[in-house]
Amino acid sequence: MNDKIKINLQMAGATYPATINREDEEMVREAAKQINLSFSQKQDLYRNLPAERVMTLVAYQFALETLQLKGRNDTGPYTSKIKELTEMLEDYFRQEP
């Protein structure tokens, strides 16, 4: 069953609407929670950097972790989900003025 739901994700002080599979909601919300945690930690470390630069560091951290795990495990399902979430975020940012 392909049951889609619409949710709002809060990340780094902004709200991002997303349409996801119902069974993925917990994982998607946990991903947003992990982003917020990493963003907050890095923002504390790099107080003089603007938020978009801090978010770049967060993205780098997660990309590096993904590549490290890819070498250790079969990450096909996770890579596919990261790609899907990345496309959702890119679609959202394309809509911004």
Image (cartoon, rainbow, N blue to C red):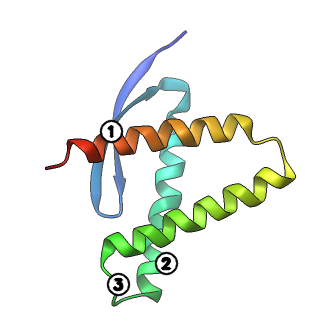
Q: Which residue is mark 2?
A: 41
Residue at left 35%, top 63%? 12
Instruction: Give the number of the disc on residue 9.
Output: none
User: Could you tell me if the residues under marks 2 and 3 are in contact, i.e. CB atoms within 8 Å?
Assistant: no
Q: Which residue is mark 3?
A: 49
Tell me the distance, in whole angstroms, between the alpha carbons under discs 1 and 2. 27 Å
**Relative depth, front residue between 21 and 54:** 54
Tell me the distance, in whole angstroms, between the alpha carbons under discs 1 and 3. 25 Å
Q: Which residue is mark 1?
A: 91
**Quick one: label 2 or label 3, which is nearer the N terminus?**
2
**Where 65 falls versus 88 (above or below)?**
below
Residue at left 48%, top 60%? 35
In the image, what residue type sits under mark 1?
A: Asp
Name the mark nearer the viewer: 2 or 3. Answer: 3
Q: Is residue 83 left or right of residue 73?
A: left
How many numbered marks have been drawn onto this rendered protein structure? 3
Give the quarter of the image for residue 80.
top right
**Quick one: label 1 or label 2, which is nearer the N terminus?**
2
In the image, what residue type sits under mark 3?
A: Leu
Q: Secondary structure at mark 1?
A: helix
Name the mark nearer the viewer: 1 or 2. Answer: 1
**Where 18 falls versus 94 (above or below)?**
above
Residue at left 77%, top 51%? 70
